[in-house]
Amino acid sequence: MQAAQPTLTVRPYQRRDRAAVRDLAFYNARVHVHLDWQTLDEYLRDQPPWLWVAYRGHRLMGVMGLSEILSGTCWLRVAIASDRHEPMQVLQTLWHQAVDAMYEQQVHTIVALLLRGWMQDFVVTNDFDYQEDIVTLRRHGRRLPPPRYPLPQLTHASRTNVENILAIDHAAFDPPWQMSLDEIRQGMRVSAHSTIAWQDGRVVGYQITTTHGMNGHLARLAVMPAGQGLGIGGALLRNMIEWFRRRSILSVTVNTQASNIRSQRLYEVYDFERNGYDLPVWTYSL
């Protein structure tokens, strides 16, 4: 008679699990890691509060982690399962743990960006609803359109500006698209170029840009609602493109929601075109 499998045990992540989690992510196919500014190793090092591990005996079978909670919403940041022994069942067990914890925290929405095809089965099984796509746009070239408005004062963003950037971010974006203070700090830390725009002595806009080899990526751009439509976003975009041109980086990408027509129109003015790389966003309502 075959011996029964040990019971699956779920508990909060601890730092002693770090090596096992890294191995799980490296050797298995069901790996969802959506961390934006961090690597998985950095995320584990920070010991996030909403991260659970599932063990069968001494073997790690799965991991699931959620983002910091903002305005009653959070993101599914990590979902990893061993290819052995019913991986979807392991993920379901971890998911129920995550949902129970978020219910206690009065979270009303959990959001998932589908980076891998296998996640489709997971979100459908768990009654997520499709919301929209994140679209990617890309520009390649040196041409810049003439400015339509007087250029605002632009300065390099520093750590002392993170509170200003947080205020702009939360005014310009609705949940779940807002960033936390820690995420802004991480973004500033890894950015290649970040700029803030001033109007009447106040910070009214910002952009954060990263590089990957000879490719640039506009990771974040936002303007205070009262300053939108006055050329501030365009000035920040122009500044970013010129910074890349001086370094002979001509290929630049940006992501935005399919529903954000206003931002897409701005990017189109600067020769960004959709490249067909779209990612679906699904939400779960508690």
Image: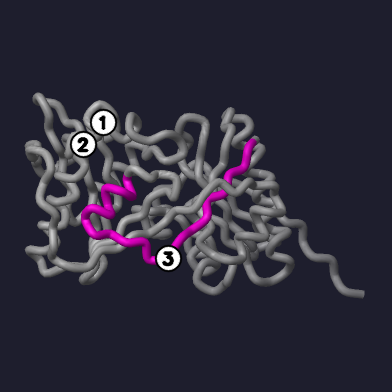
Q: Position of residue 236 (x, y in %)?
A: 17, 45
Q: Secondary structure at mark 3?
A: loop
- Rounded to the nearest whole Å, what is the CA distance between mark 1 and mark 2? 6 Å
Residue topped by disc 2: 205
Q: Which residue type carries mark 2?
A: Gly
Name which quarter of the figure residue 232 lies in: top left
For marks 1 and 2, the one nearer the N-term is: 2
| Picture disc at residue 224 | 1
Tally of numbered tags? 3
Q: Residue at x 58, y 66 (%)?
A: 117
Give the class, few, some or many, for how many residues have Cα within 10 Å of label 3's Cα (few <14, many ≥20).
few
Contact between marks 1 and 2 (CB within 8 A): the answer is yes
- Sequence-wise, the earlier of marks 1 and 3 is 1
x then y, percent, for residue 262: 33, 42
Q: Are marks 1 and 3 in contact (CB under 8 Å)?
A: no
- In this rendering, the answer to whether 117 lies above or below 205 is below
Q: Quadrant of the C terminus?
A: top right
The tag earlier along the polypeptide, 3 or 2, is 2
Image quadrant of residue 6?
bottom right
Tell me the SS state at disc 2. Answer: strand
Looking at the image, residue 240 sits to the left or right of residue 280; the answer is left
Quote the CA–CA distance across marks 3 and 2: 28 Å
Residue labelled with disc 3: 276
Image height check: is 152 above or below 186? above
Q: Residues within 10 Å of mark 1 (few under 14, many from 20)?
A: many
Residue 89 falls inside the magenta stretch: no
The residue segment tinted magenta is 263-285
Residue at image position (44%, 53%) is: 134
